[in-house]
Image: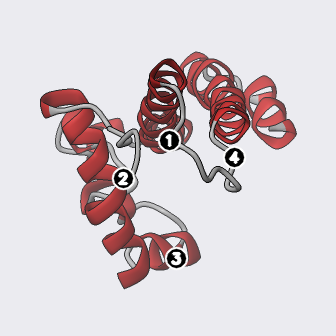
Amino acid sequence: MLQTVQAGQESSHTEVKEHLLHGVARRLNVLKRTIENIFEDFPLTTTQPVDHEVLYDVQINLHAFVMNLYGIYDNWAWAYIYQHNLFNKIDGKHEVSLFKQSTTKHLPKILKEYLVSKTMCEWHEQYLKSYRDALAHRIPLYIPPAE
């Protein structure tokens, strides 16, 4: 968080500041709080069915977690593109993503190798993008009341 705020404050680019300070920094706080809320309401030691209202609160926090986790990667990608004046080298705003070749080809080698690794690609496709797309376009996350 400190590094994000520091980088945002030090940047002379308005767009970089916006994505780091108002995007990444806020999302980091939301991610932290959603995790706290989830495990406070639904601790790992839970053995009995939880009240439906509590489950709804956990589902709301899961929704916020996944959407903000997805968004934080977009904020980082946009901050990088603006910081390095690369927007004209990307094929439009829909190609700005840390998981698209149009953006990753401009990243430092070590970061690019990490993001295109099998582990990260599978995680992005099978978890992050899959859950985000379902939340945004089809169905919300759901926790069964009991098993």
Residue at 32% across, 73% down: 122
Question: What residue did someone put label 2 on?
Answer: 128
Question: What residue did someone put label 1 on?
Answer: 69
Residue at 26% across, 33% down: 135
Q: For mark 4, does the 10 Å Cα neighbourhood hold few (<14), some (14 to 19), or many (20 or more) residues?
A: few
Q: Say the numbered circle drawn on residue 43.
A: 4
Its colouring scheme is secondary structure
Distance between the alpha carbons at the discs numbered 4 and 1: 21 Å
Residue at 62% across, 32% down: 24
Distance between the alpha carbons at the discs numbered 1 and 2: 8 Å
Residue type pointed to by label 1: Leu
Per the image, label 3 sits on a secondary structure element best described as helix
Q: Depth check: give the residue in front, 26 or 90.
A: 26
Distance between the alpha carbons at the discs numbered 4 and 3: 40 Å
CB within 8 Å, label 1 to label 2: yes
Residue type pointed to by label 3: Lys
Measured as percent of width and height from the top left, residue 48 is found at 58, 46
